[in-house]
Image (tube, rainbow, N blue to C red):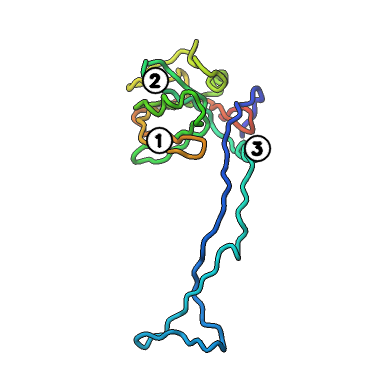
Amino acid sequence: MIPLLIHHPAPDRERRLGDVSIGGREAYLKDPPPNRGSPNRKEHGKTHDRIGFTTLSSVMREARGIDPDSFRRVCAQFATGVAVATVRGADAAPHGLTVNSFTSVSLEPPLILICIGDLCQILPYFRTSAFFAVNFLNAAQQSLAIAFAERTDNRFEGIPWLEAENGSPLLPDSLGWMECRLAETIEAGDHSILLGKVVGAEARSGTALAYFNGCYGQVE
């Protein structure tokens, strides 16, 4: 059960789904049509089936795309946790942003991924840093989620933080954190997927901050 605390809508996230079209050809086996005088081909005393082709367009309609607003509305129905992804710049300054596009990918080796929009001002820091961290927020840290989502610069101003072993910024009192070595960056539409290998992690008990249908809530 996720009792929603409707306080502040999360920032609008731009996710676009490109048009999808399906085409091509499909092979199938069939017997020759009757009464056409075309016997099956024989080779070494063996009868072979004839291979015919039909285009998929004759049996399938072209897949329709979906407009961005509809896509956002549907995605909003998927409840998630809330995290702050953090990184250090070349000048050692901390940077971070609120994300809910976090996924565990592999147990061995331990891999996770996060997605960041290509227009995000701090994406270059994540692309060039060897390490980054993901901090999972508790229900009392909603103000942090809002701050790291709305501020365009100096997002760490007035916010205390600690250093992980490899320097990644950690938020005190979070439910858990993972420090990751950047393994790969994948271009995907208007976002970049950052694949990270977990090199350090810690978890604690508590109530999680959740996000559903544009509102923050909590999960105990």
Front residue (pair 145, 131): 131
Quarter-wise, where is residue 141 in the image?
top right
Vertical order, 3 against 52 (above or below): above
The mark nearer the N terminus, 1 or 3, is 3
Label 3 residue SS: helix
The residue that label 2 is drawn on is 88
Q: Amino acid at mark 3?
A: Asp
Label 1 residue SS: strand
Q: CA distance from mark 3 to mark 2?
A: 34 Å
Q: CA distance from mark 1 to mark 3?
A: 27 Å
Mark carried by residue 2: none
Percent position (x, y) of residue 82? 53, 28
Left-right relation of 9 to 81:
right
Query: Residue at the location (65% across, 22% down)?
Result: 7
Query: Residue at the location (42% across, 40% down)?
Result: 105
Left-right relation of 47 to 117:
left
Badges 1 and 3: C-beta atoms under 8 Å apart? no
Q: CA distance from mark 2 to mark 1?
A: 17 Å
Mark carried by residue 185: 1
Query: Residue at the location (35% across, 35% down)?
Result: 183
Q: Residues within 10 Å of mark 1 (few under 14, many from 20)?
A: some
The mark nearer the N terminus, 2 or 1, is 2
Quarter-wise, where is residue 216 in the image?
top right
Count of numbered badges drawn on the protein: 3
The residue that label 3 is drawn on is 69
Front residue (pair 169, 136): 169
Front residue (pair 127, 3): 127
Work out which quarter of the rendered image holds the C terminus and state it: top right
Q: Amino acid at mark 1?
A: Thr
The mark nearer the N terminus, 3 or 2, is 3
